[in-house]
Amino acid sequence: MQPMVLLCTPANGGVWSLRNLSISVPRAVLSGEGQSAVLRCSYDLEGAALYSIRWYKAETEFYRYVPREMPPTMVFPLPGASVDLAQSDYQQVRIVNLNRRLSGDYQCEVSADAPLFHTDIRSAPLTVVDPPFRAPRLSVSQRSYARGDAIRANCSVDEAYPAPNITWILDNHKIAETISWRTSDQDFKERGAFSQMELTILEAEHYKVGLTYTSASLNRVYQDHYIYDREMEDDRDVVRYTMVPPPTGQFALGCVATIFDIYARKSEPIYIREEAPHPASVTGEDSSGTTANYSVLLTSLACVTLASL
């Protein structure tokens, strides 16, 4: 996970004793005992002495470093977690045993010492993730198809914080993604996710590379995650994808639940097969595009002609 970094420089181009303040916070970390997040703060005091470093969760201070004091570090209660003093100093603070209620904005405030006492503060968001307990569950309306069929598939994911996104996979290629809606306020509620796919098999006699399951066909659908709790009666919530049948007549369909880039889990794939070979066309070509063999038919006609003589 790449941390979010915010930089600050003087707007007027003048000389400050505190310059280039930046904060580095992981965008997301897993919750649980032993899980941790390292928050870093960097700055340039231009030769001035450091007066203090203060870390806040929202507006509540939980860690302070003042080099003039002894000891220089001071920790304040952070419900549901603790500060690892052995790995916290004037540049970083390490929080351990995280839970999802520690999600939110974190701020680093830096103050230079006398005579200027310049102070600046920067913030960045952190999300503590509670992943789903089980893998996504996938179901399909049918496990065999005839060309022209439309197959319905459902992918559901257990409750998690935040609600997972769902990516549809066709023969190991992404074809669509459903993005779960997230609240702007921190209610910390776990929510499930649901996505429905309608997969249409084209009437195509020739397999054409480039018309099927490529990442260029990715179709993102944004929907309210509350859809998990109601029936899918509105077709606007259905992800649609059209494909030509593969040469083997079989393909694998699956779905993946993801939360940021720290959690991803796949469903068991479902294999869907063509019911029967596609019948030969009237032009004398079979479904693979090869000319049919007429030797048996010619032999039969020859026998009939000889018998009538």
Image (spheres, rainbow, N blue to C red):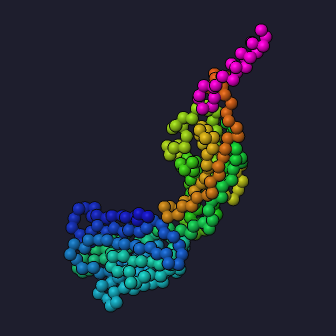
Report the quarter where the N terminus lies.
bottom left
**Foreground residue, 62 or 14?**
62
Residue drawn at point x = 36 percent, y = 69 percent: 23
- Residue that sits furthest to the right in the current view: 308
Q: Is residue 264 above or below residue 112?
A: above
Give the number of marks.
0
Observer able to see residue 193 = no
Q: Which residues are magenta?
A: 286-309
Q: Is residue 289 above or below residue 201?
A: above
**Foreground residue, 210 or 1?**
210
Residue drawn at point x = 37 percent, y = 85 percent: 73
| In this rendering, position of residue 11 left or right of residue 223 | left
| In this rendering, position of residue 136 left or right of residue 55 | right
Whole-percent x and y of residue 238? 64, 47
Q: Is residue 292 magenta?
A: yes
- Residue that sits furthest to the bottom in the current view: 70
| In this rendering, position of residue 185 left or right of residue 197 | left
**Foreground residue, 304 or 297?**
304
Whole-percent x and y of residue 155? 64, 55
Residue drawn at point x = 68 percent, y = 30 percent: 279
**Could you say which quadrant of the image residue 5 lies in?**
bottom left
**Foreground residue, 280 or 120?**
280
Report the quarter where the C terminus lies.
top right
- Residue that sits furthest to the top in the current view: 309
Q: Is residue 85 magenta?
A: no
Observer able to see residue 254 = yes
Whole-percent x and y of residue 107? 41, 72
